[in-house]
Image (cartoon, rainbow, N blue to C red):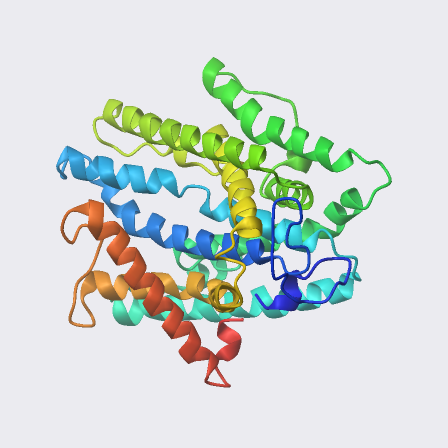
Amino acid sequence: MRTEDHAPADGTPSVVAEKQTPASPLAVREVWVDFVRVFAVFCVIVLHVAGPLLYEYNELPRADWLIANFYDSCVRMCVPLFFMISGYLLLRRDESLLSFFRKRCQKVVVPLVAWTLFYVLWNVVIEKQPIPSVRSLGGLLISPAYFHLWFLYALLGVYLCVPFLQAVVHSTHRYLATYFVVLWLVAVVAIPFWELATASKSEIDLGVVSGYAGYFMLGYLLGCRPTTILHAVMGLVGYGSSVGVTFAGTWYLTANQEGEFAGYFFENFSANVVVMSASVFVLLKFVGQYSTMLTKPQAILVLDALSGASFGVFLIHIAVLLTLHHGYLGVTLTGSSGNPIYAIPLASIVVGCLSFLAVVGLRKVPVLKWLVP
């Protein structure tokens, strides 16, 4: 994401304040936006490095499984953070439908088509899977070629709704956006929980406010409101509590299913993940705004480079992860290459660095740079 993509809506120049205090937050360059995005994409990598171990409850030493569960529990908010930061950036804008959809097509649809083709070829050439049938290829219009690409399909769905969400945001009714989020919480958290607890089926239809559009609106609301030290403390408490619930709940359910992984508490719309996402968003926003280290010119340049490559890193990191997993480079590195307590972060860092370098390399080739916008 380039600097101008998240400059303040009031059009102030993109210069950096020399000094920043809680009383005078950085208003001209929203460093925290880059910070959230970089943090989120690294968490995605951690999630995918730790994830495979969770399906080996009966094969791994219990301590190793618990370590993997802990790491994965700590990063469950990664995808919601992407939706939230996109909501904050996009819902403030006022642009024509043609302009909006043209930009989204260039940034999402074209890479989605290209990377779908890439991963189809990867499956056939590298993974030695059968050539997909015409029917299977037709299914790619609505479902991903590789599991992590689901995010782009979901993002496209929300993009189609953005003009309506912008109408809510720019409405003269001051609390309409808040009302939307409240209804969304009822639709995606309260009703499903009630159905699970009572073994009944609700006939209340709130589909119009369900899905990831709620994270868009939540990100807009939290991003536009001032963040204080009290909010940061509440975010820290909320994060710690939700991680604890996610970790303990997943352990309990998996153990009670004779080791078959139970992912209820990992769902993006579970109450614990919603709380975790909002808490981390607020906490990172506070740190990004008031950290003297992150607001130094050198740090801003690094964050801008990493943030600008984040989408490309997301797209390519699975190929890098699989390359290391199978040892195609002569070295095998996974979350189980040694004790997971250090193997998971080590593998995540290596995958992240190699993915970033791959994005930088692709951008230097004119005919390929559009793959990683």
Quadrant containing the N terminus is: bottom right
Q: Position of residue 297 (x, y in %)?
A: 53, 67
Rendered residue at 25%/32% (across/down): 260
Rendered residue at 24%/25% (across/down): 255
Residue 35 vertical placement versus 81 (above, below): below
Residue 18 can be seen, yes or no: yes
Residue 29 quadrant: bottom right
Left or right of 87 on screen, residue 63: left
| Residue reaching furthest to the right | 172
Residue 270 can be seen, yes or no: no
Residue 163 or residue 303, whichever sits in front: 303
Q: Position of residue 48 (x, y in %)?
A: 33, 51
Residue 120 quadrant: bottom left
Rendered residue at 57%/32% (across/down): 230
Residue 298 or residue 270, whichever sits in front: 298
Residue 218 vertical placement versus 111 (above, below): above
Quadrant containing the C terminus is: bottom right
| Residue reaching furthest to the top | 198
Q: How many marks?
A: 0
Q: Position of residue 142 (x, y in %)?
A: 53, 55
Left or right of 253 on screen, residue 183: right
Q: Position of residue 296 (x, y in %)?
A: 52, 63
